[in-house]
Amino acid sequence: MSLSNLGGKMYNVTYVDGYMEEVATAKRLGKFRRQPYGESLGPREQRSFRYLFVPPASIKPGEYRLVFGIHYQNRDNAKFVDIVFNETAALIPASSKGASSDTLVLGAGVAAGAALLFAIASLMGGKESKGSKKDKPAAKKEKAAPAAQEASEWLQGTAAGNEGRAAGKKAKKRS
């Protein structure tokens, strides 16, 4: 619910409540719980208030009127109430199938996207020339050499400067 105070006085929003009634007879079927706020709404200020409700489990699916009101007061403790929602709504039974159709569609889309990415990756990775297999170790050494030189300049003599070096090489150097 949203409120706008267009006047010059401050108001205190005390609580929100509501009820449910039959459409045909206007008979009240149940009240929803009262949710206290106790928040002020200053002059020329707007604010939204969230009100969560659950219809009683004994209510059967069908058309009902939902009425929600917001209660507030001014500095002089004069109390006001405004009906902020007074509409007919259809209550439907909860789904017992488990997953909704939206969830299933989303899951299928994610699976299809993953399969597409896997197919593209396998096609791109599978196209190698005969000469490229021989050139790969040399290319790795060329890429590793500049990184090792950069690390050795400012990390020389520290534990961080020894990253990427094989432990076996150290043992051979010492003996």
Image: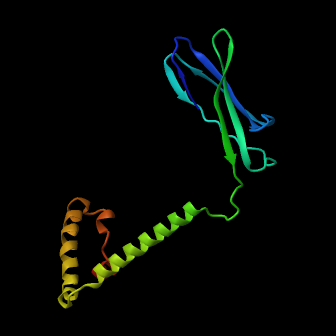
* Looking at the image, residue 95 lies above or below residue 68: below
Residue in view at x 63 percent, y 11 percent: 75
- For the N terminus, the quadrant is top right
- Residue 132 is situated, as x and y percent measured from the top left of the image, at 20, 85
- Residue 144 is situated, as x and y percent measured from the top left of the image, at 22, 73
Question: Which quadrant of the structure image shows residue 146?
Answer: bottom left
Outermost residue, front direction? 24
Outermost residue, bottom direction? 130
Question: Which quadrant of the structure image shows residue 121?
Answer: bottom left
- Residue 17 is situated, as x and y percent measured from the top left of the image, at 71, 31
* Looking at the image, residue 28 lies above or below residue 44: below
Outermost residue, top direction? 76
Residue in view at x 67 percent, y 17 percent: 80
Q: Is residue 36 visible?
A: no
Residue in view at x 80 percent, y 35 percent: 28
Residue in view at x 73 percent, y 48 percent: 62
Q: How many marks?
A: 0
Give 59 or 160, whichever is nearer the viewer: 59
